[in-house]
Image: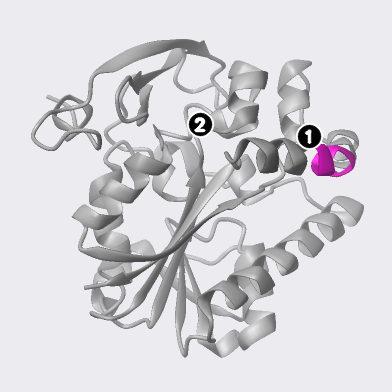
């Protein structure tokens, strides 16, 4: 029995999700083969198939797009500008600057570094699978996943930006994330929104499907329910317009993402933002919560 077989449905306490197939998708890793998505017809929660007990092999070489392996020059500058804006917006939403922050699942570390540049590098710690930090965090605070248990409850705030969707058992992963703050601590979760307007328009080409790396897919209802079940009190919830158009068009044309598609995505970002604003379904969901 898999986690999906016993997952409690967010639409009805006491029952499990009822999944229907959304069809096949491209395997972005080239390591799994045939991949597909199934979605609960009641609460909107989605799962990637086939199930993967351990996803570590997908990230062993830090070559997936989560680590920005080919970002340099103008592409790097554009992403750095976006990450700084994103970090500044997060600080405003928190209302105060936490004394200590863990970036759980920091990936390339570029956002982690930008956040540290704004509130103080000594306050921000990156954390990921690997024993050694990514290049962006050389000389900065870094906590390998293997050592996280030794630092449970040690951070005033923990952020997990586009992390929760990377595990088949997202509820268990959320428990790990929550354990890094004490009672009263702050937890920030951001995930792609399966009900985004662009998911409907672009279909399987929508960048945020990203199979097989994205293992679970969230609706607002499903994410809220999972967080309250984890003992969190939701403080704020908002949509986040995460640039996805460039890679989505690269997917559509069967091309590798490159500077051309990055610039195209930047040019189309106002269109993306307007579509999400008009429909009320942003490309990502961000929830700020407090551990009870």
Residue topped by disc 2: 195
Quarter of the picture containing the N terminus is top left
Residue at disc 1, secondary structure: helix
- Expressed as whole percent of the image width and height from the top left, the position of residue 233 reads 28, 66
Residue occupying the point 35% across, 31% down? 45
The main secondary structure of the magenta stretch is helix
- Residue 122 vs residue 18, the one in the foreground: 18
- Expressed as whole percent of the image width and height from the top left, the position of residue 78 reads 84, 56
Residue 268 quadrant: top right
Residue 187 seen in render? yes
Residue occupying the point 55% across, 56% down? 107
The answer to whether 203 is drawn above or below residue 124 in the figure is above
N-terminal-most mark, 1 or 2: 2
Tell which tag, 1 or 2, sits nearer the viewer: 2
Q: Residues within 10 Å of mark 2 (few under 14, many from 20)?
A: some
Residue occupying the point 20% across, 53% down? 229
- Magenta range is 266-271
Residue topped by disc 1: 246
User: Alpha carbon of mark 1 to alpha carbon of mark 2: how far?
Assistant: 19 Å
């Amino acid at each position: 029995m898999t986690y999906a077989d016993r997952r409690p449905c967010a639409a009805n306490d006491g029952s499990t999700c009822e999944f229907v197939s959304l069809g096949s998708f491209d395997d972005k890793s080239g390591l799994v083969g045939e991949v597909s998505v199934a979605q609960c017809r009641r609460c909107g929660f989605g799962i990637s198939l086939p199930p993967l007990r351990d996803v570590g092999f997908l990230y062993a070489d830090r070559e997936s797009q989560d680590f920005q392996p080919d970002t340099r020059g103008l592409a790097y500058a554009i992403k750095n500008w976006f990450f700084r804006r994103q970090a500044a917006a997060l600080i405003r939403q928190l209302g105060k600057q936490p004394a200590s922050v863990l970036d759980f699942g920091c990936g390339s570390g570029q956002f982690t570094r930008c956040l540290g540049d704004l509130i103080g590098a000594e306050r921000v710690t990156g954390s990921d699978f690997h024993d050694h930090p990514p290049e962006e965090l050389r000389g900065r605070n870094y906590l390998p996943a293997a050592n996280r248990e030794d630092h449970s409850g040690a951070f005033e705030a923990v952020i997990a930006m586009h992390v929760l969707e990377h595990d088949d058992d997202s509820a268990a992963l959320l428990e790990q994330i929550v354990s890094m703050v004490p009672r009263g601590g702050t937890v920030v979760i951001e995930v792609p929104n399966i009900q985004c307007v662009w998911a409907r328009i672009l279909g399987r080409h929508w960048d945020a499907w990203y199979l097989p790396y994205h293992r679970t897919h969230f609706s607002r209802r499903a994410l809220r329910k999972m967080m309250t079940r984890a003992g969190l009190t939701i403080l704020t919830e908002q949509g986040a317009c995460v640039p996805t158009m460039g890679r989505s068009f690269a997917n559509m044309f069967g091309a590798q993402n490159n500077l051309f598609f990055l610039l195209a995505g930047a040019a189309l970002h106002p269109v993306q933002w307007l579509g999400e604003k008009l429909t009320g379904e942003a490309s990502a969901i961000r929830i700020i919560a407090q551990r009870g």
